[in-house]
Amino acid sequence: AVVSTQSTGMANTMEKRVTTRGTRKTAIAIADCSHQTNEDFTLRIDNKPLSVMDNFMVSKIREAIAVIGTENLKNLNIKVRTTGGGNISKVTAIKLAICKAVVSF
């Protein structure tokens, strides 16, 4: 996991960012996790929200979110990029990358 802090804006506040990588066979998922100001949890995969993804993929990803617990995901913004592999391998790599990002954050 790569943890970095960046100075944002004129207020000179530090923003914490975590980048993690999950792999399964030839599928690679890179998750960028950062803090957001509102109380919501945002998850985007390949720049798409979960609502437009395949139901099977969404159900497997929501299993990981349920295990982590929604109380641990408040104020988090996670963006995942995927390359290679089939759908099952991608889902497994995404789950792994998300879990590593939350633990590292």
Image: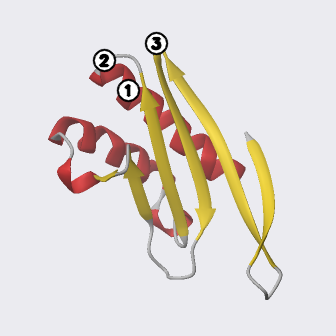
Amino acid carrying mark 1 in the image = Lys
Identify residue for label 3. Answer: 26
Amino acid carrying mark 2 in the image = Gly
The answer to whether residue 66 is seen in the rendering is: no
Identify residue for label 2. Answer: 86
Identify residue for label 1. Answer: 90
User: Does the residue at mark 2 contact the one at mark 1 (Cβ under 8 Å)?
Assistant: yes
User: Does the residue at mark 1 contact the one at mark 3 (Cβ under 8 Å)?
Assistant: no
Q: Which residue is depicted at the point 71% across and 49% down?
A: 104
Q: Which residue is depicted at the point 64% across and 39% down?
A: 20
The answer to whether residue 26 is seen in the rendering is: yes
Disc with the residue nearer the chain's start (1 vs 3): 3
Q: Secondary structure at mark 1?
A: helix
Q: Quadrant of residue 22?
A: top right
Q: Residues within 10 Å of mark 1 (few under 14, many from 20)?
A: many
Disc 1 to disc 3, C-alpha distance: 9 Å
Q: Secondary structure at mark 2?
A: loop
Question: Percent from the top left, x then y, of residue 98?
Answer: 52, 44
In the displayed structure image, the side of residue 30 where residue 84 appears, left or right: left
